[in-house]
Image (tube, helix red, strand yellow):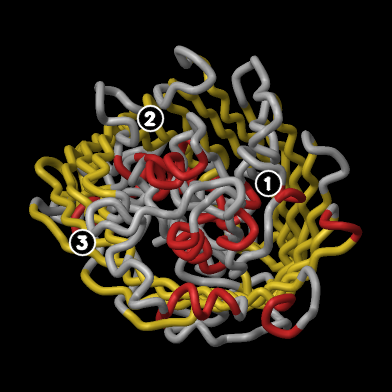
Amino acid sequence: MKKKLKTTLLMSSAPAGLTLALSLGVVPPALAQAASGEAAPAAAPSTAAASTETPPSAQPAAGADNAGATTAQTPPAPTGFWDRSNLLGDMGGLRPWLGNYGVTFGLQETSEYMANLSGGTAHGGAYQGVTQMGLGIDTQKAFGLPGGTFNVSAFQIHGTSLTLRNTQTLQATTGIEAEASTRLWELWYQQALLGGKVDVKVGQQSLDQEFIVSQYAGTFMNATFGWPVVPSNDLPAGGPAFPLSSLGVRVRATPTDAITVLGGIFDGNPAPGTGDSQKLNASGTNFNLHNGALVIGEVQYAINQPPSNPSDPKPSGLPGTYKLGFWYNSNRFADQNLDNTGLSLANPASTGIAATHGGNYSIYAVADQMVWRPSADSPQAVGVFARIMGAPGDRNLVDLGINAGVTLKAPFKGRDNDVVGLAVGYAHIGSHAQDLANAQAQTTPGYPSRSAETILEATYQYQVTPWWQLQADFQYAFRPAGGIPNPDNPSQRVGDEAIVGLRTTIAF
């Protein structure tokens, strides 16, 4: 399963402890908002570079210790147990000492219990957890090399998947579902050029950190609000996104504070072979460059963003970010209905060998817009998001994915860092996959047709302390997987599902 766990660059206004956690990309969203002092979008932990709250060119490199740079601008970070940004604080001075040499490290545990109450292939619950570890090095502090950043991160994934066991949805129930393992995630070096207007990242990378990101969507637990349903179902191994990554190079340019251009080329399959992709690349150390190519590009346009210098006046308008992008994969892709002679794969006379198509592609658009806040300094804000992605219907199980939603930050007095949200995710089954289901119905009376799957999610993030967050969640799945047959009764489809869950996230 693919997830929305995010990583890397730092926010220049964050205190040292929070800077550390952000370098891992595992800071709860409400905490990240509190650090910036802005009524920011209710984002999932994500690459600060992808954030439009601060232009990428104005942000320091990942792994950098910002304490020295921001001392004159911000008060010292809180050190009290209930007030500091991570559970272990500065670890007896170890963290700031390492920061003097450009080294940051961090650890975070996310655990959750999700239960399917109705429908699906089985009722019941499942525990899933992931421990994320990371290390960042600012090469200027460490070696005197300006503008360089080294990053390495890893996961220890534990528990079982509710989606595989109970729900069978295409839009996975939670973004942290993955095969239990201890694995490398990312391993890369980034170099800033032209005064920070351009930077180049080389190495093992997970694309859900920078591409197709919606900040407001990150509030939600279903995986489709992180790495969307189209690439997670249509790309080989679900694409280079949690918990997988691929070797490649990414270039980012920020010609103006409002415009960011991202582009990259990566190995086309992070886990080549036949079988479970996460077992095929169980350690995350498959460094391949011979499995085709995945090319991806994105243009971002940001409006009314907070200034990079806190002393500058804030814009009067409400912030928003708009993105347009594409991806292309050069591998061959199996047809979802036809065999290599043109017959339906459901036809008894079929060879059973699917026809193949050269290459695969998608075009997508993302919009995040704050639509209301009482004042520029208020923590309370309402934001909306929408994301749409299309792909060819002959070679893809999902040819259209849409998700949209609304979030309210600081819903109650005194709860400035809580977030409540409502969202919907839609996955349309490709035309040839629908044709295959219709052909199977001709030989199996009562076999269900396939159309689309819809997920409705309501969630509440409760910030217990700056380092501890709880999240309650409810999801309802209409027509799971678009209408697949129930294995206990093939003449009926899998029933609609009501799912509840509770997540806890602790930054150490």
The residue to which callout 1 is attached is: 362
Q: Secondary structure at mark 1?
A: strand
User: Looking at the rendering, in which quadrant would you find the C terminus?
Assistant: bottom left
Q: CA distance from mark 3 to mark 1?
A: 30 Å
Vertically, is 326 above or below 460?
below
Residue 44 position within the rendered picture, expressed as x and y whole percent measured from the top left = 44, 47
Three-letter code, disc 2: Ala
Residue 3 position within the rendered picture, expressed as x and y whole percent measured from the top left = 42, 57
User: Looking at the rendering, in which quadrant would you find the N terminus?
Assistant: bottom left
Q: CA distance from mark 2 to mark 3?
A: 24 Å
The residue to which callout 2 is attached is: 423
Q: Residue at x 37, y 28 (%)?
A: 409
Q: Residue at x 29, y 66 (%)?
A: 109
Q: Residue at x 57, y 80 (%)?
A: 272
Q: Earlier in the sequence, mark 1 or mark 2?
A: 1
Packing grade of label 2 (10 A; few <14, some 14-19, many >=20) is many
The answer, for residue 431, to whether it is visible in the render is: no
Instruction: Please state which of residues 348 and 459 is positioned toward the viewer in this rendering.
Output: 459
Packing grade of label 3 (10 A; few <14, some 14-19, many >=20) is some
The residue to which callout 3 is attached is: 165
